[in-house]
Image (cartoon, rainbow, N blue to C red):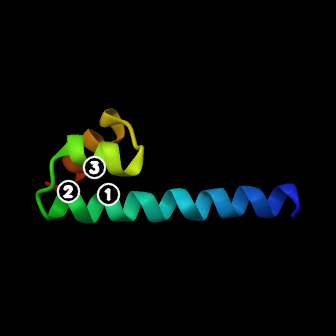
Amino acid sequence: MTDLLRELEREFEEKGIQKVAQRLLEEGVSIDTIEKATGLSREQLEEMKKQLH
């Protein structure tokens, strides 16, 4: 696999994880739980939560 394909695959994976995290935030799942499940940082999740309101 070329470096470009690997990079694109990584970007798509990250976007998917962020989408899932956003949906979980919308459903009221705690940041701690989402952080453990997705590997996203607390800071990223708090920023995403701010954007929901």
Give the residue pinned by disc 1.
Answer: 21
> In the rendered structure, are the residues bearing label 3 and label 1 in contact, judged by CB atoms less than 8 Å apart?
yes
Is residue 51 left or right of 44 when viewed as pictured?
left
Circle on res. 25: 2
**Sequence-wise first label, 3 or 2:** 2
Q: Quadrant of residue 1?
A: bottom right
Look at 27% across and 49% down and name the residue there. 34
**Mark 3 to mark 2 CA distance (whole Å):** 8 Å
Q: Position of residue 8 (x, y in %)?
A: 70, 62
Residue at the image position 82 percent from the left and 59 percent from the top: 4
| Kind of residue at badge 3 | Ile
Which residue in the protein does label 3 denote? Answer: 34
Q: Nearer the viewer, residue 28 or 36?
A: 36
Q: Position of residue 10 (x, y in %)?
A: 64, 57
19 relative position to 15: left or right:
left
Residue at (42% x, 44% y) in the render: 39
**Residue drawn where x is 31% and y is 43% of the image:** 35
Type of amino acid at the residue the image marks with label 1:
Ala
